[in-house]
């Protein structure tokens, strides 16, 4: 009798209809799930991220077993564990006398490279299948990108609307417009508070994982105290339904708002569940569309939400595979400053940064605008090294996988890809943060002051950034106005701005080596 086919399922592939299982029968298949040191430590992940993935993996193994599959589950503390996917797959092939290996392509370049090696390293045939949980196959994305000078998300998004039929009437967008972003710029109204994101009960499996994490990863960033992420499909579906009912209607309006201590506002907080496979992105979008069609959520909220998923999420994933491996080393603006320690400690009088680091530490989460316009914007203006910043973002968020964080960091935030992804850097001074948040009122710095020791550091850093990158950026149509303003300032005024920024930059203490890897 030939042996079974071995199907390795990785920690972000926790979906019962994953492509690697689609044509398999339980009688002829062994599913392999592996907790391995290489994955838990290739960066020093936030404790909550490790806990989320290991607990969700253990729950998923139970779900598969209940559905009749044979699951071989290797635990992190198993004595024989080799510590790598490759080592564990090789051991399992021998253990089960497998006649072949069938896997779904991984989400990260690093793991894809290792998996490709299996074709020569393993004694059996290896089949690697596309990840059909993404709505846009990579081949379609490459075709879309081929020959285009500008790879703008908006054009890709419109094609995705046509392809999925989401919010379409025939070949026209419902309501006559593709994009309702202009209605989605509500700042924080006084006392703006959002419904609670329900934390889930910790069962015995999760508590066991917590003990493992506290023991093995004690020195890692972050805390488990507020851990509330769904680790089962059922809990993820509850989180989804609560979001659709309670927060989606105001998602659009407050999408760009920031309120100190309001860590989730009207955001979905579903990215970890989507990224590890507990929720299907297309199904989620269809449910959001139903909320609009049945009159429970306004079009601008639903369009904004769907755009994030079939637009940004799919586009970012396509760009990752299109631009790697070069994207990992990209440093188009030659930014060389080491990551400051404040990204770990949150110790800074800058209230916006300190609150964003706090929610990151407490929840392994910050919402998009905190990542982009506070943590990211500061990294851009201060000229932080893209590889440091990418490592930080990969460590700290429960939803962080390289395919999604690296294009966001290197492309969307830092312009390290010289504008392949974003039409201009999202550089902003303190005025933007003041408009969109309630941070500045309680800050030690004065957001209205432009230079000097009391002035909001974003203000002088903004001009320092434009000045030092003039050669690279002054040609951008959308930066023409700020450059014209800068040039109109007197030489003395410009020097004062630059000096103020330099003085501030000297106060930054680099993080201790070894914080990420
Ligand atoms: P919501 O604001 O409610 O949005 C709904 C969904 O849209 C998200 O769940 C997510 O699936 C998708 N989405 C929205 N924006 C993006 C985007 N720019 N790229 C991809 N998907 C998007 N997202 C990750 O999933 N993992 C990351 O590691 C990650 N790193 C980021 C790093 C930076 C510097 C920036 C600016 C953004 C990053 N994002 C990342 C995108 C975005 O910030 C998160 O997806 C979002 O904050 C997740 O929270 P949410 O579910 O409440 O999202
Ligand atoms: C992130 C992560 C962690 C912390 N641990 C594991 C693990 O022990 N086993 C596993 O299968 N996956 C883990 N993951 C997720 C992987 O890093 C992810 O599947 C790959 O990077 C491919 O995207
Ligand atoms: Fe942030 Fe500046 Fe506002 Fe302080 S004043 S919270 S540093 S933007």
Image (tube, rainbow, N blue to C red):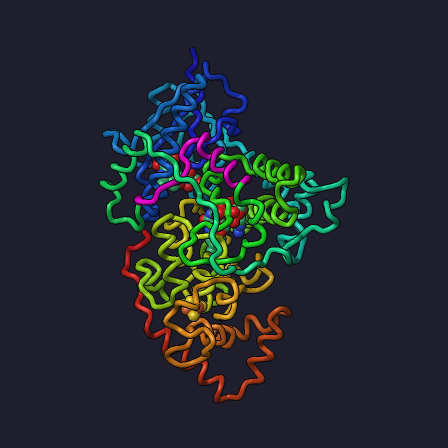
Q: Position of residue 23 (x, y in %)?
A: 54, 22
Is 239 within the magenta? yes
Rendering quarter of residue 120:
top left
Total numbered circles: 0
The boundaries of the magenta stretch are: 224-245
Q: Position of residue 100 (x, y in %)?
A: 45, 23
Q: Is residue 49 left or right of residue 219?
A: right
Residue located 49% across and 55% down the image: 192
Q: Nearer the viewer, residue 242 or 380?
A: 242
Q: Position of residue 516 (x, y in %)?
A: 33, 53
Q: Nearer the viewer, residue 116 or 81?
A: 81
Q: Position of residue 372 (x, y in %)?
A: 49, 58
Q: Quadrant of the N terminus?
A: top left
Residue located 31% across and 63% down the image: 347
Q: Is residue 397 left or right of residue 312?
A: left
The quarter of the picture showing ligand 2: top left
Rendering quarter of residue 207:
top left
| Visible residue check, residue 403 | no
Is 294 within the magenta? no
Residue located 42% across and 19% down the image: 66
Q: Is residue 202 above or below residue 5?
A: below
| Visible residue check, residue 343 | yes
Q: Is residue 331 left or right of residue 40?
A: right
Residue lying at the far top of the rendered structure: 1
Q: Nearer the viewer, residue 462 or 327?
A: 462
């Amino acid at each position: 009798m030939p042996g079974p086919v071995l199907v390795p399922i990785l920690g972000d592939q926790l979906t019962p209809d994953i492509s690697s299982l689609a044509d398999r029968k339980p009688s002829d298949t062994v599913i392999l799930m592996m907790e391995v040191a290489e994955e838990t430590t290739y960066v020093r992940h936030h404790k909550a991220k490790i806990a989320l993935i290991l607990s969700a993996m253990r729950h998923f193994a139970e779900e598969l077993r209940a559905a009749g599959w044979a699951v071989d589950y290797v635990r992190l503390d198993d004595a024989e564990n080799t510590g790598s996917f490759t080592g564990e797959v090789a051991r399992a092939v021998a253990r089960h006398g497998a006649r072949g290996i069938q896997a779904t392509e991984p989400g990260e370049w690093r793991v894809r490279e290792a998996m490709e090696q299996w074709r020569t390293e393993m004694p059996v045939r290896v089949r690697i299948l596309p990840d059909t949980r993404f709505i846009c196959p990579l081949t379609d994305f490459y075709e879309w990108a081929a020959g285009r000078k500008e790879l703008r998300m908006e054009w890709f998004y419109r094609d995705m609307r046509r392809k999925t039929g989401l919010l379409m009437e025939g070949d026209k967008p419902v309501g006559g417009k593709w994009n309702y972003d202009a209605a989605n710029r509500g700042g924080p109204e006084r006392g703006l508070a959002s419904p609670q994101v329900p934390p889930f009960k910790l069962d015995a499996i999760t508590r066991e994982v917590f003990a493992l994490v506290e023991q093995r990863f004690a020195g890692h960033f972050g805390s488990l105290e507020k851990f509330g992420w769904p680790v089962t499909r059922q809990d993820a579906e509850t989180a989804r339904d609560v979001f659709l009912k309670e927060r989606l209607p105001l998602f659009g309006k407050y999408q760009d708002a920031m309120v100190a201590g309001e860590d989730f506002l009207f955001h979905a907080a579903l990215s970890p569940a989507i990224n590890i496979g507990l929720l299907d992105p297309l199904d989620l979008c269809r449910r959001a569309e139903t909320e609009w069609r049945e009159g429970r959520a306004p079009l601008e909220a639903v369009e904004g939400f769907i755009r994030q998923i079939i637009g940004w999420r799919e586009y970012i994933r396509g760009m990752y595979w299109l631009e790697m491996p070069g994207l990992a080393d990209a440093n188009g603006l030659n930014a060389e400053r080491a990551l400051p320690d404040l990204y770990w400690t949150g110790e800074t009088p800058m209230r916006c940064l300190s609150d964003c680091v706090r929610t990151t530490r407490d929840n392994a989460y910050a919402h998009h605008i905190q990542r982009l316009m506070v943590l990211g914007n500061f990294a851009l203006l201060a000229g932080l090294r893209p590889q440091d910043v990418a490592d930080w973002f990969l460590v700290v968020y429960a939803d962080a996988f390289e395919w999604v964080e690296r294009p966001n960091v290197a492309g969307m935030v830092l312009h390290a890809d010289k504008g392949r992804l974003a039409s201009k850097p999202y550089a902003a001074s303190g005025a933007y943060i003041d408009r969109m948040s309630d941070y500045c009122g309680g800050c030690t710095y004065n957001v209205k002051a432009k230079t000097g020791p009391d002035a909001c550091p974003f203000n002088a850093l903004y001009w320092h950034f434009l000045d030092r990158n003039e050669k690279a950026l002054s040609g951008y149509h959308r930066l023409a106005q700020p450059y014209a303003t800068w040039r109109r300032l007197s030489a003395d005024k410009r020097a004062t701005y630059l000096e103020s920024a330099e003085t501030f930059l000297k106060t930054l203490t680099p993080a201790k080596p070894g914080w990420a890897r």
